[in-house]
Image (cartoon, grey):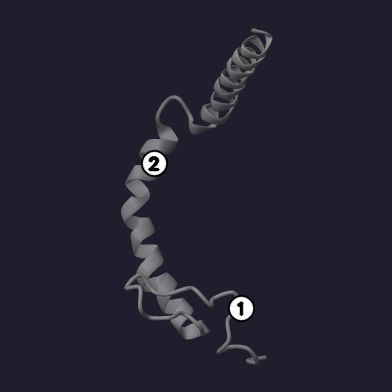
Amino acid sequence: MTDGRNNVPVTENLTRFDGTTPVRDMVTLDAFFREDVIPVLAEEREYFDKLANTWPPVTYFPPLLLVVGLLVDYGLLGMFVISKKS
């Protein structure tokens, strides 16, 4: 049951937030989440709540960006077609 406890897969490039301590085993991975990740998320919670609860909701941005991108592409295509006819 404890086979692989000291060998966490896909952590070859994972280090603690100090940038030098590698995270390779479960003990270090636990410390990484407990001491590095969770305190940062707790500090950023206020910003997340502000982003999640203000208008316009974040869900409006992807369709808006899609429409703007399509208009820009349409304009660029039109410029390309007109310049080729001249």
Which residue is located at x 58 percent, y 88 percent?
5
What is the three-letter code of the residue carrying label 2? Answer: Asp
Query: Residue 20 location in percent, x, y?
Result: 35, 78
Which residue is located at x 55 percent, y 21 percent?
68
Tag nearer the camera, 1 or 2: 1
Neighbours of disc 2 within 10 Å: few (<14), some (14-19), many (20+): few
Query: Residue 65 location in percent, x, y?
Result: 54, 26
Neighbours of disc 1 within 10 Å: few (<14), some (14-19), many (20+): few
- Residue labelled with disc 1: 9
What is the three-letter code of the residue carrying label 1? Answer: Pro
Q: Secondary structure at mark 1?
A: loop
Residue 47 or residue 72, whichever sits in front: 72
Residue 49 image label: 2
Instruction: Work out whether 25 lies above or below 42.
Output: below
Residue 56, by quadrant, is: top left
* Circles 1, 2 touching at the beta carbon (< 8 Å): no
